[in-house]
Amino acid sequence: MTKPVVTVIGSINMDLVTIASRVPSQGETILGERFRLIPGGKGANQAVAAARLGAKVHMIGAVGTDAFGKELLHCLEREGVSVDNVKPVTDVETGVAVITISEGDNRIIVVPGANHSLRPEDVEVCEEVIASSDICLLQLEIPLPVVERAVALAKKHGVRVILNPAPAQPLPLSLLEQVDILTPNEHERDIVFADIDASRFANPFIVTEGARGVTIIKNGQPTLIPGFSVPVVDTTGAGDTFNGALAVALSKGMSLEEACLFGNAAAALSVTKLGAQTGMPTEDEVQAFLKTKKGCSS
C-alpha cells in the first residue's frame, strides 16, 4: 500500500524542559526535579507524528547552523522525515522553547530564532514537493506571509490544507477561505474568529478541547468526538500529535469523524510519556489502543 504523503511547513525548535513540583512565584527560586533537551517545534512535532503513523513526510522550515540545528536535523532524519527542504541559517540561532512542567501541565516560552528567517520564496522553490502531497499541514510559528504563500501553492495544485492556528493571531479571511480544515483549541478559536462569525464559516473546523476530545463544526453545527481517559505525564505536544494524526488519517481516506477519533487516540497515548516527540505513538500502537477501547465499550 502506498504511503500517504504529508508536507509540513513550520517551526523546528529545541525544547528545554524543566520538571518541577510546582511553578515558582514571581521572584522565587525553587529546585527542579529534572531537566531534558527534547526535539520540538510545532512543525517538527507534527512531522514526526505523521511519520510515526505511517506517512511519507517532507519538512519545510529553517534551523541555525549551531549544535541545536544539527541535532534537530539528525533527529528528524532518524524518524524518517525528509529534511532536504530545511533551510540552514547562519546569522541567527536555532529556535528554542523553554518549558516548565508541573502537576502534568506545562508553561512555554518560545524564542523563534531561525524559524522567523523562513521567507515566501523558500516555499516557492518547494512547489513541486507541495504539489505531490496529499495534505499540506501548517502552523503559525513561522511568518504569516510564508503560511499564506504555502496555502496558495497548495490550493493551486488541489492539495488539501490543514492549518493549526497556533500560536493564535487574527487571520485574514482570504487565508481562512483557502484552508480546508482549521484546528484551533478553544483559546485560539476565540482569537481567530474574534471579528468573523464562525457559524458562517464555510469550511469545517475542529476545536481541540484537551481530555474532553474535539468538536467538529460543520455549517455551524457542532459534533463532539470524545477523548480517552489516560494517566497524564506530560501534555506537551498532544495537539501536535492530533494534527499529525489527522493529516495521516484523512490522507488514507478516513471520514473527518473517523480521522478525529484516530487523532484523539494518538493524542491520548502521547500524554502518557514525557516529551513532545518522544511520547508520540506509532500506527500499530494507536490501532491496538483503539481495539482495547472498543472492547471496553462493547
Image (cartoon, helix red, strand yellow):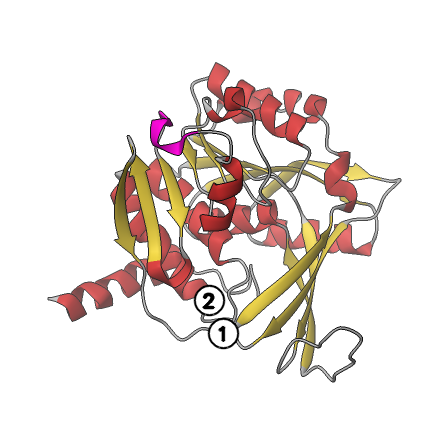
Going from N to C along the chain, the mark reached first, 1 or 2, is 1
- Contact, mark 1 vs mark 2 (Cβ under 8 Å): yes
Q: What is the three-letter code of the residue carrying label 2?
A: Val
The quadrant in which the N terminus is found is top left
Q: Secondary structure at mark 1?
A: loop
Which residue is rendered at x = 69% and y = 33% of the image? 143
- Residue 235, relative to residue 21: is it above or below? above
User: Residue 163's spot in the image, x, y percent?
Assistant: 49, 36
Q: Which residues are magenta?
A: 197-202
Q: Is residue 16 above or below residue 127?
A: below
Is residue 181 visible in this depiction of the protein? yes
- The residue wearing badge 2 is 271
Percent across and percent down for residue 49 are: 48, 51
Residue 17 screen position, x and y as percent: 67, 68
> What amino acid is at disc 1?
Val
Asked whether residue 1 is in view, the answer is: no
Residue carrying label 1: 233
Q: What residue sits 45% from the left and 63% below the top?
A: 270
Q: Is residue 85 above or below residue 270?
A: above
